[in-house]
Amino acid sequence: MRVFPITTLLPERTQAQKIVSLGSGKLSVEVLQSKAQAFEDSYLRVVKPQFIDASLISETPEFYDKSRAYFLRLLENKRINPHPKSMFYYQQEHHSGLILGGWILGVDAEDYINGKVKKHENTLSIKENRLVRHIAALESMAEPVLLSQKLPAILTELAVEISHSEPLLHVSDELQNIHRVWAVGNLQDIEKVEHTFEQFDSLYIADGHHRCAASSRYLIERYGVNSGKGIMALIMDENDLLVKPFYRMLSQVKPEILWDFINAEGIHHWEVAHSLSYEDLKKGQILCISKDKRSIIQISPDMMGESALSKLDVNILETNILSKAYDLKDSSEDNRLTFMRGDTPLDTILQKLTEGSIDLAFLFAPNTMSEIRLVADQGDIMPAKSTFIEPKIPTGLIIEDYR
């Protein structure tokens, strides 16, 4: 793997708290819009200019022009400033109390094109094209993709050494996470990081499949190969990632069809009376909730195939149960299926069931990074929304400058 320092723009230290923000999927649209309107220097105005001007239509020239105008204003007002080509060590003090950390640097776009940066999800061409146009309009990328591997002790030791100094940036977010950034300016340390990653033959995308595809495509098309401009990535040890599942929620279906199917197929299941979270579930157990019933469905070995993908609980639910009971063919296309983060309070799910906006909800134990790696190594693609992986990094905390 080829990694290297990157040219960046960083938020002005004393104003960083007002500039950077968690994005879509982490905070509600209402919260994001109110932040964009409250803080004139918020990077949310660059990402979502329609929060300020509701007449803007996404993907139009006017949309991208307004986005670029906000970006240039931040530059002119010195709210974001050029930083010498560097690598960074990033650390998040997660609200759970865990300390998560990794390396922010450039990864050669060719390594993604050539399959060394391995994916486990498909990208949608519409979303990828939209991102390419936004990157081109801003000539920058404001959020790193999250990559993982099993990292050696030498990087842990270096991280401890670097993090003893005062951080370059220090901000908190609405979820009570604290984010810290240190620049790796020592040439010897940079060479140590580069040499360490040269020993790897692959990295795995944990989060940011569309950003990875779009930025690599933009860089190759605009600058060609060996340009010294790479995909901005946060690379973390896979054991430090927090992997959570998604609820899969079905609407416009009759729950009794599912129970009749499970009974007819002889699939072992039992009812539970108490609340369960994904942390209570074991591999091979699927929590199924309807308005009037809460059960655990037990996966049996004969429901699994030989591939890593065929052994995943989420894949077994879709291919062995939902496809047969409800003719669900593609979870990314069927409008009866929606998703919600697996750490969503159960009361929220129960309210949706009571209101009738959904008819069934399913939850699993999280996939492990080992399982995700095996799927990627075998060239397979996991069902949509199989994992929610943290840490999530605020947009605008580190901006790779392609200009």
Image (spheres, rainbow, N blue to C red):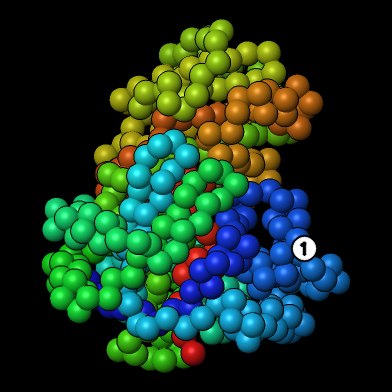
Is the residue 245 above or below the residue 295 in the image? Answer: below
**Which quadrant does the N terminus fall into?**
bottom left
How many badges with numbers are in the image? 1
Which image quadrant for residue 47?
bottom right
Q: Is residue 229 left or right of residue 175?
A: left
Q: Position of residue 358 (x, y in %)?
A: 71, 31
Residue count near mark 1 (Cα–Cα under 10 Å), binned few <14, some 14–19, many ≥20 = some
Provide the secondary structure element on which disc 1 rests. Answer: helix
Q: Is residue 344 left or right of residue 314?
A: right
- Image point 79% across, 68% down: which residue? 52
- Image point 27% across, 56% down: which residue? 164
- Between 23 and 17, the one lying in front of the other is 17
Q: Position of residue 97 (x, y in %)?
A: 40, 37
Asked whether the viewer can see residue 264, the reply is no
- Image point 62% across, 34% down: which residue? 249
Which image quadrant for residue 59?
bottom right
The residue where tag 1 is placed is 37
- Between 370 and 65, the one lying in front of the other is 65
Tell me the kind of residue under disc 1. Answer: Gln
Asked whether the viewer can see residue 239, the reply is yes
Is the residue 231 above or below the residue 178 in the image? Answer: below
Q: Position of residue 285 (x, y in %)?
A: 42, 23
Q: Residue furthest right?
A: 55
- Image point 53% across, 35% down: which residue? 342
Q: Position of residue 286 (x, y in %)?
A: 47, 25
